[in-house]
């Protein structure tokens, strides 16, 4: 099993055990690949949910640019809901897991073909 496959297994475990979601493994794999090399960098692989700049990055770079959503308060509300589902106290909120949940939340699975 390669490094990426190990990370995807870790993300699936987080979705199951921390978020109570049974992951669509094909979509999770595609979202993980879409994160690019960030998944291999300890700092970039996680979302610092307590930092407003990080939330803004997720909103702008992922929701608006990647998913093509119009800007609005519902974007921040969705991020907050995902963070709440993941667990506010959960220290490592993996970017791929957050992006996966946001993709599902907005029904944008077709972006990943």
Image: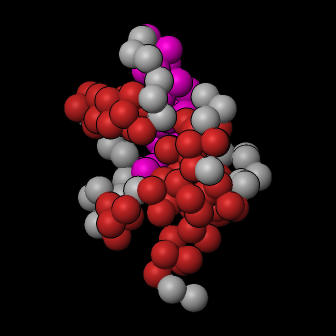
Residue, x 50% and y 60% (percent of image)?
32
Residues rendered magenta in the picture: 73-95
Q: Is residue 17 visible?
A: no
Residue drawn at (37%, 53%), measured in percent from left and top? 46
Q: Is residue 89 left or right of residue 108?
A: left
User: x and y percent of residue 90 in the render?
Assistant: 48, 47
Q: Is residue 32 toward the left or the right of residue 110 in the image?
A: left
In-front residue for pair 26/38: 26
Chief SS of the magenta region = helix
Instruction: Inspect the magenta stretch and tell me whether residue 76 lies in it.
Output: yes
Whether residue 69 is situated above or below residue 89 in the rendered picture: above
Q: Quadrant of residue 76?
A: top left
Percent of width and height locating residue 12: 64, 61
Task: Give residue 33's position: percent from left, percent from top.
Answer: 47, 63
**Residue 90 part of the magenta segment:** yes
113 left or right, relative to 71: right
């Amino acid at each position: 099993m390669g490094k990426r496959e190990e990370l995807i297994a870790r993300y699936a475990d987080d979705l199951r055990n921390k978020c109570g979601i049974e992951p669509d493994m094909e979509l999770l794999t595609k979202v993980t690949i879409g994160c690019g090399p960030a998944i291999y960098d300890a700092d970039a692989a996680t979302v610092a949910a307590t930092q407003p700049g990080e939330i803004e990055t997720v909103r702008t770079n992922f929701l608006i640019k990647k998913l093509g959503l119009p800007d609005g308060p519902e974007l921040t509300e969705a991020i907050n809901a995902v963070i709440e589902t993941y667990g506010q106290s959960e220290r490592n909120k993996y970017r791929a897991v957050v992006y996966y949940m946001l993709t599902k939340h907005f029904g944008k699975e077709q972006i990943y073909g």
